[in-house]
Image (cartoon, rainbow, N blue to C red):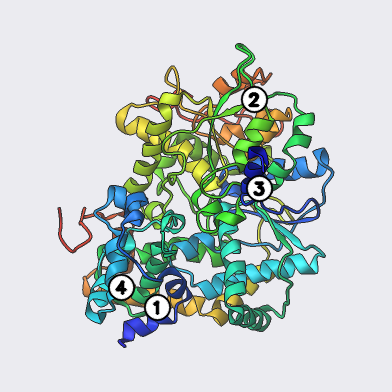
Amino acid sequence: MDMVTTNNRQWEKYQKEIADDRYYYARSCIRQTFFPGSEWAFIDILRNKLGKDIFDDPKHTTCTGIGYHSDVVPFQTTMTVVARHFALMTEAGYANITPSCITSFGIYTEILHAWEEHPELLERVREDLYKATKREFDVPKNLAHTSDVIYKFRNQIAMQMVHPLVDVHTGKPLRVVDHIGCHYAKMFPSKGVGGAEFPAVLSGMVDAWGGECIDYPERRHCCGFGFRNYLVQANRGYSVANSMKKLESMEPYEPDFIVTNCPGCGMFLDKWQYTISEMSGKTYGKNGYGIPVLTYEEMAGLVLGYNPWDLGLQMHQVAVEPLLDKMGIDYDPEKKYCDADGKLISLPKCPTFLKQ
Amino acid sequence: MGRIIDILNQDTHFCDGLNSCMNCGVCTAVCPAAEFYNYDPRVIVDTVQRGDESEIEELLKSNTIWYCGECMSCKPRCPRGNTPGEVIMALRKASIETGLFVESEKGRQQFAIKRAIADSVLGVGYCVSPDIAVPEKHPEQGPVWEWICANKEQVYERVHANYDGNGAGALRHVDEASLNELKEIFKVTGGTAFMESIEQCSKEKAAALGMDIEEYLHETYTFNSGGDGYGNNE
């Protein structure tokens, strides 16, 4: 067997099945709060750029994930809330579910695994859901995180590319740091593209769209959310310290931007750059700027030519303009803080050190 | 077998998370909590594995079990297939079920988390919302978040969200029927009882400490003595 075949066989272990159409969409508490433009862009790309069927259900709720991993919601409750999502999916005539959150994805994966290992748990959940809501459900045929779906169609997106991940001034690929988030593949490595060891879901997009992913020492380290370690103000030192460990580790590689899988990780790597700058004066980008942090939907949206302010990039604390300039994107800086009618809302205050 | 060990043995996380630890310490080496706290998941797993009821009871009363961030970075690294993070989840649940969580500073924080997150789940249908992550409690979020919160309707409309609206879309108002289903699920599955036990134990502890409940809530959200996790202050 030649080396290429052997490597391909090895790599097969790190692939996963991703449904190619008809998705039931599960929104994210954090993504819809901090990156609502990303959720809009995901649906818009699927429907209008890729011609896919995706159902956005008003009856969907949280999976309770943050409560579950901060130990105020028991497993039986979380499983039954997720079972209700499966019931809504079943009733709407869908069999593939795509959550927009890594915490949710980890929980859905854990639950499906638990039901396989302990079938009695599934039976009890069926009983509890019926008792509480009179609903019944099918277990989904396919579970894919929303980034898995974009990864699957990365080459179709590349064919519609308006702005590749290339510095228009030098012609060189943009240097990108990816962060796939702990619960994407550390708990169940076979359920994530590339597993926990070879993060490929985001770097696959970066490669397909002309950029270059940087492998740096703390690439796999947690962003520092740590659930209760952020939720409680007294514990936030843990959170900022872990983000700082990553930022310090990536800084020497001079990344043009960070792309994140998990909405929480994206929010922390963005906001903690502000906090660190206020605490110590330190900024991680060039000329007093930070390192811009994008969600993969925002990255896909920019590549496809979406207006940055439609994507919600004005909601980031770290200014994205240096990146937009490198990509040669024609944006209107005057419209950054405007409402839907193009009227200026007001201007946010400026940080002490971080350029905005 | 002791009472606490019986509770642990009924917990799926405990049964799945602990096979046979050989004390190699890889979990501690990769642990983000061990990096910044005086915290050692290897020692916890070793203590639990020994099965000494009184040692486990001490753990349930201590700060130690509350440092883990549940990132599960330990899971793919353990050569024996253990997950210290899952053992921690089981210990925390047992600490709440036995009421021992109020004995430690970090354990008492469950009250602040219950009031913020669990109440949000049943109140608005999501763990987090722009109405809960208010800048006064989140100064670290910075001036852009402050700007968003001060202009929620306009900013969210600009980025195609359906803030507090009916129908589909990001941040829509979750209808009463769906919220009632969530509440029923919490009742039927023990979620409500679990949350009420956090409330009840916290109220009793607040009274014992001579605090009213709002003062206690503020204390559990903000106070950090810098303790080392073993009952000592550094």
Residue B55 figure quarter: bottom left
Give the number of the disc on residue B48: 4
Q: Is residue B63 above or below residue A34?
A: below
**Label 2 amino acid?**
Leu
Q: Chain of mark 2?
A: A
Q: Which residue is mark 2?
A: A165
Label 3: chain letter: A
> Crowding near pointer 2: few (<14 within 10 Å), some, many (20+)?
many
Query: Gap in Å between the C-alphas at discs 3 and 2?
Result: 30 Å
Q: Nearer the viewer, residue B68 or A77?
A: B68
Mark 4 vs mark 2: tell me if same chain. no
Q: Residues at badges 2 and 1 in contact (C-beta under 8 Å)? A: no
- Frontmost of labels 3 and 2 is 3
Which-is-in-front pick, marks 4 and 3? 3
Residue holding disc 3: A9
* Mark 4 and mark 2: Cα distance apart in space: 50 Å
